[in-house]
Every structure is written in C-alpha cells, then in structure tokens.
Amino acid sequence: MRFLILLSILFPVTSGAADTREHVILCGGPALRQWEDLRHEDEQHDRWWGNFIRASTLRMAQIRLEHGKEANLLWIVYRPGYVHRAKSDGKPYPQWIESQATKRNCRLIWVKNGEEAIDAINALPSRSIHTFDFFGHSNRHAFMLDYGSEIMAISKAWIHERDLSKIRGSVFHREARCQSYGCHTGESMSRSWRRKIGNRLIGAIGKTDYSGVGHGLMPTVSGSWTR
C-alpha cells in the first residue's frame, strides 16, 4: 500500500481535459453589398466580404506566435451569411473559408444560429478555453452573427447578453483572455459576460473599424477598449 501511495505522489494521474488548451474564434457574417450601397457612404459596412474572415486569420497568426504553432484553433463561423453573400457576388466564399481553415490547421464549425454557436462552445472540455475572440457586427447588447445578409439592417441570428447564461462558464479557463471586436460591446455586454461567464470580456466603447485588416492590421476602435 505504501508503495502505491508513493507511486501516486511521484507519478500523479492527470486528466487529458485539464491539459487541453482551446483558442476559440467566433465569426459573424457580412451584409449584402446591394444593401450597403443604399446607405450613405459614411454608414456603409462590409464593402469587402472578408473583413471578419481576414481579422480571424490575423488573430490565428497571433495566437500561434503567443501559444505555439500547434495551438488548437476552433473557428466557429456563421455560414448563411457567407452563402448569401457568395450568391450575390458570384463567388465561392464558403469554399474559400474552408480552404483557409485547412491551410491554418484549425477546426472549422459552421453554424446557422446563435444556439448552434453556443452548443459548439459548450461541447469543449472544462477549463479548456484559454482565448476567445468575436469578429462580427454587434451592438451594446448582442453579438450579431447575421446583419443584413437577408434583410437590410436586420439581424436574424445573434447571441444576446440574455443568452450568456446558456454558455457553460466552466469551459473557460479562469485566466482566459476574451475579446469582442464588434461595435459597442464594452458598453453593456462586457459587464454581462463578466457576471454570467465569470471572465472579463474586452469590448469596444464606440465603433470598431476593420478597414486595416486587408493590410494586416487588427480592427481598431473609435473610442477605447474596456473590460
């Protein structure tokens, strides 16, 4: 018995789940160009279809530099937005996104609503999420996975701050770094995230700007970032 106790001290049994480190990127879809062309020039979004996709891949590169080239990347992408934009533009955007996932050795999960996105997050092992990033449209109360891909200026898929209680806070590491690159998230949703998930969510006070992502720059904010 003493020998077994000694072995357990020298060679403790560890859980594989405890060693799992996941880096989750949630990506919303673009509006249709035909709707955006009807807006005043200063209010247009998504003239380029790939703002959120390119921002996602820039973040993947950052994660691999910070956490190693074998870091586990999980990319949760709202598929209907890219299907609608692909049909409108005559381009195979979903296939291009799948190619990007393969190129970067990340797991791609297509979702069609907020519930499926939450299910994908909840399926991860306890305390495994070390980073979480959202790229997409948002307002102060919600991540908008869809915005204007079917109806101009209307969202048909989202994760509202009221939905955050559906996310298992236990899947996040206690020191997980979470950030939303959507507009206005820091004005309300960051507080709800902290209260319901348990981690801080870096969010924007003001609008975010994706105009630099095509030049290798992460989105910026018109105001400031807050936790």
Image: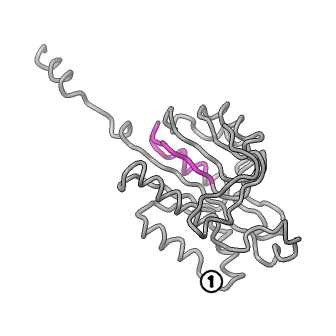
Check the image and report above or below for 199 versus 149. above
The quadrant holding residue 147 is bottom right
Q: Is residue 3 left or right of residue 146?
A: left
Residue bounds of the magenta highlight: 118-134
Residue located beneath label 1 in the image = 91
Quadrant of the image for the C terminus? top right
Check the image and report above or below for 189 versus 46. above
* Residue positioned 53% across, 61% down in the render: 58
Q: Nearer the viewer, residue 220 or 97?
A: 220
Q: Position of residue 28 (x, y in %)?
A: 66, 60
Q: Nearer the viewer, residue 216 or 5?
A: 216
Q: Position of residue 78 (x, y in %)?
A: 63, 62
| Residue type (three-letter) at the residue carrying disc 1 | Lys
Q: Position of residue 130 (x, y in %)?
A: 48, 42
The quadrant holding residue 83 is bottom right
Q: Position of residue 159 (x, y in %)?
A: 70, 49
Q: Categorize mark 1 by other alpha carbons within 10 Å: few (<14), some (14-19), many (20+).
A: few
Quadrant of the image for the N terminus? top left
Q: Is residue 122 magenta?
A: yes
Check the image and report above or below for 7 versus 192. above
* Residue positioned 60% across, 53% down in the render: 117
Q: Is residue 155 left or right of residue 81?
A: right
Q: Is residue 181 magenta?
A: no
Q: Nearer the viewer, residue 217 or 43?
A: 217
